[in-house]
Image (cartoon, helix red, strand yellow):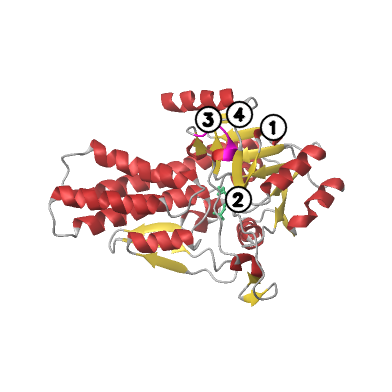
Amino acid sequence: MNDVFTKHIMFDKEHWALCLLDQRKLPELEEYLTVTSVEEAIYAIQQMVVRGAPAIGVSAGFAAVLAARQACQQTQSDADRRESLHSLLERLACARPTAVNLTWAVQRMKTLLAANPNTSACHIPELFLEEALRMQAEDVRICQSIGHHGGALLHDGDCVLTHCNAGGLATAGYGTALGVIRGAIDQGKKISVIADETRPLLQGARLTCWELARDAIPVTLACDNACASLMQKGLVQAVVVGADRIAANGDTANKIGTFGCALLAQHFAIPFYVAAPLSTIDLTLTNGSQIPIEERPAEEVTRIFGKAAAPAGIAAYNYAFDVTSASLITAIITEVGVLRPPFTSSIAWAHTVSAKV
Ligand code: MRU
């Protein structure tokens, strides 16, 4: 695994700063953005300097450290500092709506705060930093485990189609969907990848191709609208995608266009796998219609690389995610194993297993 996939989210304790590989600039430039306040961290998440559900969660953990530091720098009572930390965490949790890993990470910090009622507010940054580093290390292990379970589902010689970027860049390292591909390769299989370009922000072309090429994993780029034809030609043996939020029944929100891939996979009887950590499953939602779908600025669609891609003033839909219904999903690959339909019971089982670990 290339080094950069665990160095794209780094915390510099000496300067109390979060250093993020700026994913907006890849593949052209490998530049880091340094973030020193929770407001800057929210901006970085919203502008997609860091993106991908688990990577957003891990970054939010570090952003909570910055929030705790800001709160403790205020000359107030400890109770006031805790209060202002709470409101900063609330704002952080709302940076983007769809990926549940963001609220999951913030909730984990809030739980830690509540469990330490007598800790001075000025010791909370240290406490949060330990937890954020734990979350980061856990995420890499979880992705490797997803890779191990999912890798077993792929066959030697398979070509896997993936949509968006659910790789090392979208996690703390190794990746979920790309983790499955890495897992299969680690198991000695020859695997190649078709990366959908993933308009409007081209995470497939810019990020998936970039990280797979760096790992010397064979990858071919395709326009999003080539999916049906590539499947018809017999070029795709499996589809593996990540997830931003999975409802308790298995309905899955992921990058816009995923639903279309799933429908096509069903038409051509190609297995369609979702790879995600259990932290992406939102047990409070019974089905996918309850998942909040982010709408992003129309300019992301009407402009490309700073240039007009449509006449001025044209309206554009820019839903960032869609929901694939559970009935189209062959299996959900998690760190505790491969979940099969009916997902309501397999997801519930997975949570009991993880509670025991
Ligand atoms: O808008 P993005 O780039 O944050 O969307 C990312 C995705 O849709 C990923 O597939 C998902 O977060 C899973 S990342 C392991």
Mark 4 to mark 1 CA distance (whole Å): 13 Å
Amino acid identity at mark 2: Phe
Q: Nearer the viewer, mark 2 or mark 4?
A: 2
Label 4 lies in ligand 1 vicinity (Cβ under 8 Å): no
Nearer-the-camera pick, 298 or 125? 298
Residue carrying label 4:
339
Label 2 lies in ligand 1 vicinity (Cβ under 8 Å): yes
Helix, strand or loop at mark 4: strand
> Can the viewer see residue 130 in this picture?
yes
Residue carrying label 1:
327
Nearer-the-camera pick, 165 or 134? 165
Amino acid identity at mark 1: Ser
Q: Which mark is residue 321?
A: 2
Q: Which mark is residue 336?
A: 3
Amino acid identity at mark 4: Leu
Q: Residue at x 69, y 32 (%)?
A: 327
> Can the viewer see residue 275 in this picture?
no
Does the magenta-highlighted stretch encompass residue 12? no
Q: What is the span of residues highlighted in magenta in the rendered image?
A: 285-289
Mark 2 to mark 1 CA distance (whole Å): 18 Å
Of labels 2 and 1, earlier in sequence is 2
Task: Give left or right: position of 267 versus 221.
Answer: right
Mark 2 to mark 4 CA distance (whole Å): 23 Å
Amino acid identity at mark 3: Val
